[in-house]
Amino acid sequence: MSDSTALTFGKAGLPAPANLAAALRNVQNEVGPGGMTILKMDKTGHWCFGTDATEIEEGSTWAIDPFSFLHGFIAWGDGEVLGERMASVSQPLPDLGPAPDGATKGWESQLGFMVRCMDGEDEGQVARYTTTSVGGKRAIQELAVKIADRVDTDPEHPAPVCELLSEHYPHKKFGKIFTPKLKIVDWVGLDLLASGDDAVEDEENIPGAEEVKAPAEEKKSRRASVEAPVADAPQRRRRRA
């Protein structure tokens, strides 16, 4: 599924890899635009995107553009965004004035980035993920530091390909609280990220990737089953948030 609002990944004229690494490490110190497809994790731990809250396909992988990391602030009213001030992590935080009238919590700090689906039914889908939650920002901070380390060791392949998962912890008042988990399964170059071609590196030689990985044969099999579904198989239904 292609997105008409897709941004160009890895644009020319952006910071050099060394500057990118420094900017990404700044994220650990940080405690859509109109028409852009929004990706989010709901309160039950399911990832979904778009106005109809379509749940992502189980097992799908999503690449994060390392040049798209943002930091800034957002002001929410009664279920709507009243104001948003975001900038690249390579730039200072945006200046803020008074919070908009009706903002329930004033200005809240926010982190985010752009993602592209690399396989499955949503291959090519581009979306923007931002979060104000403590767990969400922590996941972005940890990912940013891993990318910075990757840029230092292999600047030709700085873009992580992740499974979008969730984990949870008990809360005395609110019960089970879900937080994002971004599991790195691959690293790709910006050329692949921009083209959306379905190709992967040899995962056995990928430093920084998590230990638990799907074998390459299993990944190819999963993709083949998506590309050539059995005629009599029932259409997969997605849970709607």
Image (cartoon, rainbow, N blue to C red):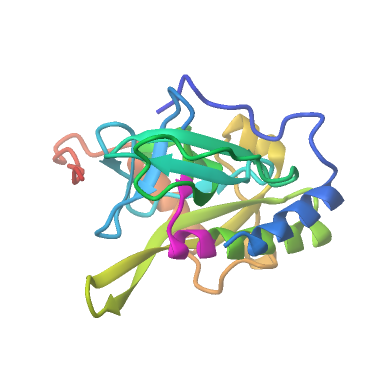
Q: Residue at x 55, y 74 (%)?
A: 211
Residue 133 vs 81, above or below: the answer is: below
Front residue (pair 174, 52): 174
Q: Residue 226: x and y, percent?
A: 34, 41
Q: Is residue 220 left or right of residue 72?
A: left
Q: Is residue 132 magenta?
A: yes
Front residue (pair 143, 153): 143
Front residue (pair 100, 163): 100
Figure quadrant of the N terminus = top left
Q: Extreme top residue here?
A: 4
Q: How many marks?
A: 0
Magenta region, mostly helix, strand or loop?
A: helix
Q: Is residue 192 left or right of residue 114?
A: right
Q: Residue 233: x and y, percent?
A: 16, 41
Q: Residue 202: x and y, percent?
A: 65, 58
Q: Is residue 57 magenta?
A: no
Residue 119 in view (yes/no): no
**Which image quadrant is residue 77 in?**
top left
**Which image quadrant is residue 186 in?**
bottom right
Instruction: Point out the stretch of residues depicted in magenta.
Output: 130-139
Residue 107 vs 176, above or below: the answer is: above
Q: Residue at x 53, y 65 (%)?
A: 138
Q: Residue 6: x and y, percent?
A: 52, 26
Q: Residue at x 82, y 40 (%)?
A: 15
Figure quadrant of the C terminus = top left
Q: Is residue 173 left or right of residue 30?
A: left
Residue 188 in view (yes/no): yes
